[in-house]
Amino acid sequence: MKLCSLITLVFFFSVKLNAQISDSEMESLKADWWLELKKEAHQMIRKMPKEESMSDFSDSVQRLFLQDTFVLENIFRRQLEKESTTLGINKANLFCASEYEKLVDKYFSMLQAKMKKEDRDLLLSWQKEWKKLMATEQTLIGKLMQEQYSGGGSIHSVEYTARLMNQNKNRLLTIIDYLTHMI
């Protein structure tokens, strides 16, 4: 009888630990994490010495970038720890992709402000073409995730949402490189 109770108890806790949490609950957690991690990142950045080889502008961009990405990467990690199902991983990837896209826009605006007026059209065209490519990529990924192409299976959705996240992250890294090393 004790063994049966113990098995039932273990089963209950394992189901409880792996259960999905509601979207509203996750959003609430992310809001709390955001505040906590923003404070932690701010303290960490304040302790960092200025790099002598960088201009004041580049140093400030690098610090802001480190703060932004510290918060985002840690929310992503916590979200995966909290909900490690396939659906949870996809939600975390898409959340992170969306947040990286916001950071791309934020740092692109900084880059645009540093460009000469006569060169901004080239920069705007570069960004417009990238956004167009990403929209096409998202549509293509949506098609490729369908069973007729992927053969089914949830792992494909994780690979594709991770690809979207990484593309936005790589675009951000390119813009940061321009801001900190080329301007």
Image: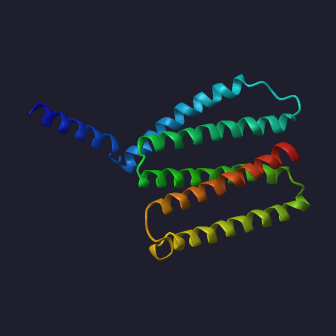
Q: Position of 164 compared to 172: left or right? A: left
Up-down: is 150 above or below 111?
A: below
**Residue at the outermost left position:** 1
Up-down: is 45 above or below 175?
A: above
Residue 182: where, in percent of width, then height? 88, 47
The quarter of the picture where residue 152 lies is bottom left
Quarter of the rendering occupied by the N terminus? top left
Residue drawn 76% across and 52% down? 174
Q: Would residue 109 be visible to someone looking at this image?
A: no
- Tally the marks: 0
Q: Nearer the viewer, residue 74 or 119?
A: 74
In this figure, which colouring scheme has been used for the structure?
Answer: rainbow
The quarter of the picture where residue 54 lies is top right
Q: Position of 52 compared to 68: left or right? A: right
Residue 67: where, in percent of width, then height? 66, 36
Q: Position of 8 compared to 91: left or right? A: left
Q: Nearer the viewer, residue 10 or 111?
A: 10
Q: Nearer the viewer, residue 155 or 46?
A: 155
Residue drawn 64% across and 40% down? 68
Residue 145: where, in percent of width, then height? 50, 69
Residue 166: where, in percent of width, then height? 63, 54
Residue drawn 53% across and 34% down? 35
Q: Position of 120 compared to 109: left or right? A: right
